[in-house]
Amino acid sequence: MTAAVVLTPVSAPVADHVLVVALDGALDYTNAERLRQDVEAALGEEHRELVLDLSGMDFCDSTGIRILLSVRKLMQERDGAVTMASLNARLTRIFKLTGLTSAFTLAASLAEAVAAVGARSTPR
Amino acid sequence: MVDHRRQWPITDDLAALRENIQRYALRAGLTGSRLDDLVIAANEAAINVLEHGGGAGTLAISCDGGVLAVDVADHVGVLRPGAVPDERPTGRGDRGFGLWLMGELCDAVTIDRVPGQSTIRLSMQVGDGADDEGAAPVGRSARPV
C-alpha cells in the first residue's frame, strides 16, 4: 500500500471557521479512503472553509479525485468550500483534464488561498 | 531503439509501480509532461485491474522502434477491444472514466482480449520531435512518487 498521505494542520492568519492543512505524499487508490477519514477527523464543528496546501502532494489519481470531491461535498453541506494551493505540474494536468479546476478554488500559493478565503467569507 | 522488456506484478504497492514506470520511461527518453501523462495513465490502468479486473495482473513495459509501450494485463478477460470512450463519461467512479483518461493522456490505447485475459496497451512516441509539446529538462518531474 502507498504510504498514507500525511495531513498536518498549518497555522495561518485565518478566522476560526477556516481550517488550513498541508497534505504530503501521493494520493491513490490504496490510501484515498484513509485521507477522507483523516480530513473528517481534523474538521471541527466550527469549520466551514477548508484550505489544502498541496505543495507536498506529488501525485493524485482518479480515486484521489473522487475523495477530494467527497470532501468538497462535505464542505458544501456546511455552506463552505475547499480551496487548494500550490499544485505541481502533474496535479494541475490531471485536475484540468478531469474538470476539477472548475470544481475547486485554486490558488498559486498558500498566502493567496488564505486571502481568497478571507475575502469570500465572514464568520457567522 | 530496442530496450529490454521489464515486467512487474500489479499489487497495492502502486507507489513502487509508478516509480518503476517512471524510471524506465525516463531512460527511454520520455520527459516532461508526457512522462507525467504516461505515469498517470499507467496508474489508472493498474487501479482498473485492482478494482474491476480481479485484483491481480501484470504490468510490462518495453520500447521498440521509438514507441514506448505499457501493457497492463488482468486475469479476468472481461474488458473488450473498443471499450475506450471517445467522450468523457459523466460518472467519475466507473471503469469508463479511467479508460477515457488513458485515451486523453496517451498517443494510443488499444485493448486485446483472449479468454481469461484482457490487456490494455498504452503507447507513447519517444522519437525525435514527438515530445515537443511540454518538453522539459530531464528531472523536472522525476521525483519519485
Image (spheres, rainbow, N blue to C red):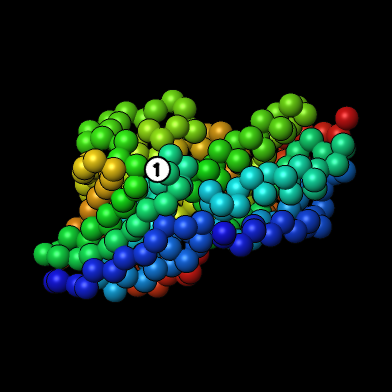
* x, y percent for residue A4: 64, 58
Query: Quadrant of the rendered structure where residue A120 is?
Result: top right
Q: Quadrant of residue B78?
A: top left
Task: List x then y, in percent, for residue B133.
Answer: 27, 55
Please give left or right for residue B24 compared with residue A41 in the image.
Answer: left
Q: Nearer the viewer, residue B12 or B103?
A: B12
Q: Residue at x 43, y 67 (%)?
A: B19
Residue drawn at point x = 56 percent, y = 52 percent? A30
Indicate the position of residue A105 as horizontal and vertical percent values.
60, 39
In the rendered image, the vertical position of residue A65 relative to residue B17, given as above or below: above
- Identify the residue at image location x=60%, y=52%: A31
Amino acid type, callout 1: Gly
Residue assigned mark 1:
B53
Residue B138 is at least partly visible in this image? yes
Residue B23 drawn at (x, y percent): 36, 71
Q: How many marks?
A: 1
Which chain letter goes with mark 1?
B
Binning the other alpha carbons within 10 Å of mark 1 as few (below 14), some (14 to 19) or many (20 upward) gives many
